[in-house]
Image (spheres, rainbow, N blue to C red):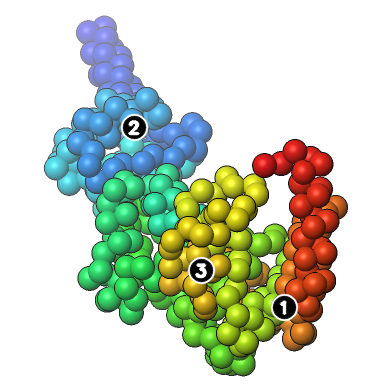
Amino acid sequence: MRKKILGWGLLAAFVLTAGAGLVLRQQFYGNAVVTERDLYVSVRAEYGQVADSLLPQIKHRRAFDAYARRINLAETFKPGHYVLKHGMSVIEIARMLKLGLQTPVRVTINNVRIPAQLAQKLARQIDADSTAIMQALTSEELAAEVGFDSVTLFSMFIPDSYEFYWTVTPGEFVRRMKREYDRFWTSERDVKRKRSGLSRLEVMTLASIVYEETRKTDEMPRIAGVYVNRLRKGMPLQADPTVKYAMQDFGLRRILHKHLKYESPYNTYRNKGLPPSPICMPGIDAIDAVLNYEVHDYLFFCARATFDGYHNFARTLREHNANARAYSAELNRRKIK
């Protein structure tokens, strides 16, 4: 009888031990992520902050803590953007953080007028803050490294979406953008550029004016052609968007005579030729519109009084003044000042 009781006791102990082992294995190797989530670990984060962000998003937290201590994760975790995928175990999560197996993020740059706006936009998409990014965008040393200066560096950025590691430094970002810039300027684009007689910087600068003049892509080559004609004749471009940029007043709805006198190298009413650098980050459509500018004999254009986003084009100042009066009258009628 005693032997039977002992046997049953040993069997129960074995079952309990095996069950505990299975539970323990499940804690370490079982699914710890129910719903896929993103985890961002800043280069400025301490391990306590990482744990505070991570632990509420996973199961088996004690097992994670135990394994993290075993691999000294508090001293060896890597910053980055991580994806906690359904089915991952605490061991896989901890190893991912230790080895820095981060997932790239999509960084989009477009629709900015000045470097400070670009810095702010980037700071919302990568780990670096806007101050550090702005320092890179205005660094003479970094600009010279990639073949520009601190004023013209802005012309290097081609609007698009790119994959980066979230922890990319501002300097690494600028260097990567130089490679994208070189990739953008294909031999085909350079052949077209030479037809215009413009440098790459001048193409980007003129494209920025065209982009600010219209968002109608079908009209961009015609507007570009007007400016190419004026440049070749030595006429001031007299582009209203350059006045807004010079004054840093992008909310101006009506350019008045007093605005035309504003002293700035970017004011193309006071200065012949192109401004020193782009007045915004032009869209690729605008860049290609300059490279494929329409050949014609127009020298002027003015927004239509219909306010449909298109323009009336003129060969003579007399024709242009008539168009301008019609547009001005409509501005007055709509009480736009």
Q: Is residue 202 left or right of residue 254?
A: left
Is residue 41 shown left or right of residue 179? Answer: left
Q: Quadrant of residue 290?
A: bottom right
- Depth check, mark 1 against mark 3: the one in front is 3
Q: Work out how far the residue at label 3 is from the one at label 2, CA to CA, in angstroms.
A: 58 Å
The vertical placement of 149 against 234, above or below, is above
Q: Please tell me the numbered disc located at residue 270.
A: 3
Secondary structure, mark 1, is: loop
Question: Which quadrant of the view contains residue 41?
Answer: top left
- Residue 92 x %, y %: 34, 44
Q: Is residue 262 left or right of residue 62?
A: right
> Tags 1 and 3 in contact by the CB under 8 Å rule?
no
Q: Position of residue 138 (x, y in %)?
A: 30, 61
Which picture quadrant has residue 295? bottom right
Tag count: 3
In the rendering, at what x and y percent does residue 257 appear?
Answer: 60, 56
For the point 48% across and 58% down, the residue is 262
Find disc 2 in the rendering and name its residue.
Answer: 54
Q: Residues within 10 Å of mark 3 (few under 14, many from 20)?
A: some
Marks 1 and 3 sit apart, C-alpha to C-alpha, by 18 Å
Please state the horizontal and vertical placement of residue 47, each as a whole percent of the image.
20, 35
Quick one: label 1 or label 2, which is nearer the N terminus? 2
